[in-house]
Image: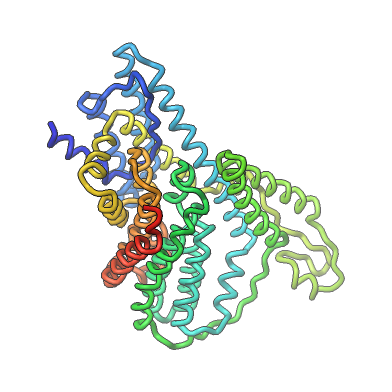
Amino acid sequence: MPYFNRLVAIVILWLPACGEAAASAHEKLDLTQHWAGYFSLVAMVLAYITAMFEEVTTLKKSKPMLLAAGLIWAVIVFAYQQQGILEPPVNEFKANLSTYAELMLFILVSMTYLNVMDTMRVFDALRNWLENRGMNYRQLFWVTGLLVFFMSFFLNGLTTGLLMGSVVMAVGKNNARFVSLACINIVVAANAGGSVSPLGGISTLFVWQHGMLKFTDFFNLFVPCVVNFLVPASFMQFAVPKETPVLEQERIVMHRGAYGVVLLFLITIILAVWSDMYLHLPAAFGMMAGLSLLNLFNYYLQKLQHEYVKTPAELFSNLANSNISSGVAKYQHFDIIDEVGNLDWDTLLFFYGAMMGIGGLGYIGYLDLVSHLLYGQLSASTANILIGLSSAFVDNGTLMFAVLTMHPDISQGQWLLLTLTLGVGGSLLAIGSAPGIGLLGLTKGRYTFSSHMKWFPVILLGYFASIGVHFLVNARFF
């Protein structure tokens, strides 16, 4: 059976593993060679394969994952009941559910703020500002990349990627080569920048949420992540044309209260960090407090939605929607309930199914096999680098949860290495991260899987260069 156990371990490694396995110290059964274990493993594999072919089947990815999670925990509880045990698996399920609730609330507030800012045309105004700067293609290549890198500290990679992708599409509509190169640069920048902050991506959020690294610890990855971004960008820039695009001038006015929402979003992030570092409460506590501020600000805007102005010129310069003939401005306000309803619930439910499903596999005992294979027979550095390379094919957040569920005994430097490799490893392929997948759909064939692959060698060089720099500048943590 040892060969079977190794095979099972390898299969689980390539699953989108999400979950928290805080195993009970007593009355835990080893179900790895029990029918319930085999059934659970097959259910999870089939669910993931079905989710991967979402575009072919048109079946939303959350549905098979939710079904698999339900079946897995049902058979686990049934198997324990057969042995006269009930409480341990129930408590384990509740622990996993609590972990997911914290994650969901954090993401829910963050996505709600982003949706509101999008509704109030904050991102449209930023895109329009960039388009009207009169920069040439090479300057835009660097500016969009740098903006994505720094914005990814606080915004998710998909949002920043699509925002700058729309800029690239607008200015490069007559130059497909520029669009392709700029999109590759955006993907690399988004993944590199997102690794510097726990707010930049799911994998970093998971590590922070589980207390493996403090909020400020992530800043030690700044220099390695800058190297990861600069190495491929320095090579690609020579292929970017130097011409200056000719664009039509357009004026975009943000809605009333837009600056207030941006300020409240920054305050909300500060509250999340403060609640974690000083109150020792989950970061979701601070995020929910920030959501209450957004609700109160929305109430203020709705109560003062009519404002009289003296001249049409003043009206135009300050308002998005107006009735100039009457001198009354009618503001388009947002509704928090509508914004929450417009969230990407399919993805949130997918993460529930994945986290609960892999949490079940961890409770069964399969992830102990993976942990022994990776961190028992390989060095921690080798294991973390290989896991990072696998994120080119599998979502980095789910892989991070797999490792967290294994509970490996590794140093702070190794946790930083894992965070780095999982974050930037997704840049190796166009399908390796959310920004890449989003831009594949946005660019309509100008940025493709094959165009990204042409620059795979320099992206891989940046991957290993960032690892080398991490060992150099963060040697004290190992």
* Res 180 quadrant in image: bottom left
Left or right: residue 171 versus residue 471 is: right
Residue at image position (42%, 87%) is 242
Residue 393 visible in the picture: no
Q: Where is residue 303 in the image (x, y as percent from the top left)?
A: 80, 50
Indicate the quadrant containing the N terminus: top left, top right, bottom left or bottom right: top left
Residue that extends furthest to the front in the rendered view of this protein: 476
Residue at image position (34%, 36%) is 358
Residue 20 visible in the picture: yes
Left or right: residue 399 versus residue 267 is: left
Q: Position of residue 68 (x, y in %)?
A: 34, 33
Residue that extends furthest to the right in the rendered view of this protein: 310
In the rendered image, the vertical position of residue 80 relative to residue 191, given as above or below: above
In the rendered image, the vertical position of residue 455 relative to residue 193, given as above or below: below
Q: Position of residue 287 (x, y in %)?
A: 60, 45
Left or right: residue 174 versus residue 10 is: right
Q: Position of residue 356 (x, y in %)?
A: 39, 34
Left or right: residue 147 versus residue 32 is: right
Residue that extends furthest to the bottom in the rendered view of this protein: 243
Residue at image position (75%, 72%) is 316
Q: Nearer the viewer, residue 338 or 213?
A: 213
In the rendered image, the vertical position of residue 207 relative to residue 23, given as above or below: below
Residue that extends furthest to the top in the rendered view of this protein: 84
